[in-house]
Image (spheres, rainbow, N blue to C red):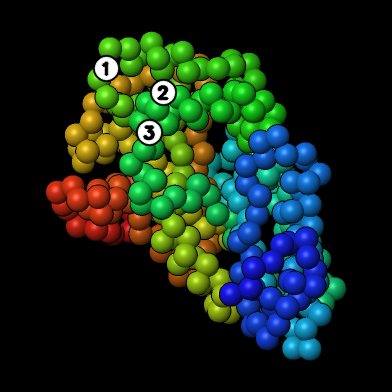
Amino acid sequence: MVEASLADTAALTRAVSQVDVVVHLAARMTIGDTPADEFVDVNAGGTLRLLEAAVSQAKPVRRFVLASTDNVYRPGVPTTVPITELQPAVPGDYYGMSKVLAEQVVVNYHVLHGIEYTILRLGSVIAPDESIGLFRRDWVRTFLVAHAQAGRRSNLWPLFAACGDLAHLVDAATAGRDGNPAVDLAGPRGEPWAIHLTDVRDAVAGTELAIDHPHAANEVFNILGPRTTTTAEAAAVMRKLAGVDAVTVRLPVTLAFEVATAKARRLLGYRPRWDYEATLRTALASSGAPPTGDVPVGEA
C-alpha cells in the first residue's frame, strides 16, 4: 500500500515500481465550489503524471486502465439512445470535460510510448446499500435541488436551465404521504425518467476483464449495468420488496439516458448481472430483511 497524491510525481513513480498493470480509479468527482482549473488538474493532470511514472520505469507498465465516465456523452441531452462508444465525447460538465482530457492523454501516451491502454466509461456506480435510498422522496428532492442549484456545473444543466427547482412539484405530489415514499418521475407526456445504474460488482467484473483480456488493448468500452432503470420500474420494485408507498410526480422535462454495452459483451465477454431489483434484494438481505427471492438475477 502506497498512499500518494496525484500531484506528487516522485511518489507516483515509487507507487508503480515493478507494477504490471495500473488501474486508475482516483478522481475528483463532485466539483462543488472547487475552481475548475484545480478540478481538471486532478483528473487530467493527475492522469498525465501517473502515466509519466508508468512509462519511466526500467520495465514499463504493460497496460494502463483508465476509469472514465458516461458523462462524456452529455447525459442531459443525449443525441442517440442507447449510446455507443461511437458517440462523440462531447461532455456537458467539468467532470466529463476532465475525463475527456484524461482519455486523450492516455491515447497520446500510447502513441508516444507504446503503452497499452483500456478506457472504461463507467456509469452511475452504486453499492448495494446505496440502492435502498434511491428513488425515494428524500433522494429525489435532494437530486433535483442539487442539480438546479449547481447551474452549469451540473451534468444535467440543460434539463433544468429553463425550469429551475422542481422540488416543489415533488412536495405537492407527496403531501400527506407518510414516511419516505418511492417516487416515479414522469415527463410532460407521461414518459418515465430512466437512469442507467451499475452495481459495483458489475463494474469490478468489467475492470477485471480490462486488465488482461487481449481484446481490451487500446479500446474504449462502456461498462454499465444490464439495462436502464425507469423510475416507474424502480418505484414498483421498491413497493414490492420494501413495502413502501409509491407516488407518480409529473415534471416538465424528461431524463432518459441509456448506454449500450454491446461492444464489451462482444469483445470481452462482459455479462452484467445486477439490475436494480437484484441490487436492492442484496441490500435488503444484508440488512436483515426477509429474503424475497434469488440473488442475483440472470442476464437481462
The residue depicted at 23 percent of the width and 26 percent of the height is: 245
User: In the picture, which quadrant includes the N terminus?
Assistant: bottom right
The residue depicted at 65 percent of the width and 54 percent of the height is: 27
* Amino acid, disc 3: Phe
**Which numbered disc, 1 or 3, marks the residue that appears first in the sequence?**
3
Q: Nearer the viewer, mark 3 or mark 2?
A: 3
Q: Secondary structure at mark 2?
A: strand
Q: Nearer the viewer, mark 1 or mark 2?
A: 1
**Residue furthest bottom as drawn:** 58
- Note whether residue 175 is visible: yes
Residue under pointer 3: 135
Residue under pointer 2: 186
Quick one: 31 or 153, which is closer to the camera?
Answer: 31
Residues packed near mark 1 inside 10 Å, few (<14), some (14 to 19) or many (20 plus): few
Residue under pointer 1: 177
The residues tagged by marks 3 and 2 sit, at their Cα atoms, a distance apart of 13 Å
Residues packed near mark 2 inside 10 Å, few (<14), some (14 to 19) or many (20 plus): many
Relative to residue 119, is residue 11 drawn left or right?
A: right
**Which numbered disc, 3 or 2, marks the residue that appears first in the sequence?**
3
* Disc 1 + disc 2, Cβ < 8 Å: no
* Amino acid, disc 2: Ala
Residues packed near mark 3 inside 10 Å, few (<14), some (14 to 19) or many (20 plus): many
Residue 149: x and y in percent read: 62, 23
Relative to residue 150, is residue 257 drawn left or right?
A: left
Relative to residue 229, is residue 256 drawn left or right?
A: right
